Amino acid sequence: MDYREELQAYQPVNEQEAKDKEVTLSYLSCFGDNLLTRENEFAHFSASSMIFNKERTKVLMAFHNIYNSWSWTGGHADGERDFLALAMREAMEETGVSSLTPITAQMASIEILPVWGHMKRGKYVSSHQHINFSYLLEADESEALKVKEDENSAVGWIEIDKLLDYVSEPEMLPIYNKLIDQAKKR
């Protein structure tokens, strides 16, 4: 589904999502499809996913080199208009799993996330915003995992009730917990 249709159809589940959807629609009226590329250095689209085992007791995460934390998978739109396909491709690239199933084909949340200035591939990237669509995916725990060395230094299954011990970005925990709650209901 095209990202604009998905955004219009999405029903926010809380005040944060309602405000972030409103701001995203405002950005779209100003910047249009330029938000699909990193050429827009103020804000651009990304898609992320929480990957669950079949029992919904663990999540597959990567230790992200820039954020120095265990994190969900995801990446920049870079022109892609189907954000579920983007989230699935990024999940496979970042974890090495070859088979993923969407728990639901619709996005599970929307958030605008700050990205602080950092070095990437020897160049400085200024602080900016990621307008992020999040998805719920399922993978088989027995699949072989593989580190994507230019982005992460570890990949592993984490028990949901121990997530706090692994994630060093406290601002991400409410988003992760919201997605975990949604996945457990499906």
Image (tube, grey):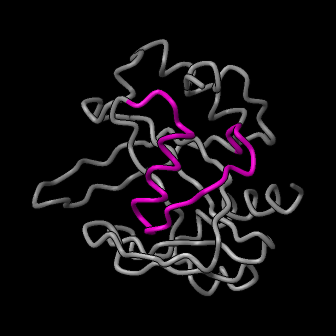
Q: Is residue 185 above or below residue 2?
A: below
- Magenta highlight range: 80-108
Tell me where residue 30 appears, x and y as whole percent.
43, 14
Say how many tags the image has.
0
Q: Which residue is found at the position 77% from the left and 40% from the top? A: 15
Tell me where residue 48 appears, x and y as whole percent.
53, 51
Q: Is residue 56 above or below residue 44?
A: below
Residue at the farthest left position: 122
Q: Which residue is found at the position 50% from the left and 75% from the top? A: 70
Residue at the farthest right position: 185
State the quadrant of the C terminus: bottom right
Tell me where residue 142 appears, x and y as whole percent.
61, 80
Residue 96 painted magenta: yes
Q: Quadrant of residue 14?
A: top right
Left or right of 57? Residue 23 is left
Q: Is residue 113 above or below residue 94?
A: above
Q: Is residue 80 above or below residue 91?
A: above
Work out whether residue 138 or residue 111 is closer to the camera in this orientation and state it: 138
Left or right of 57? Residue 117 is left
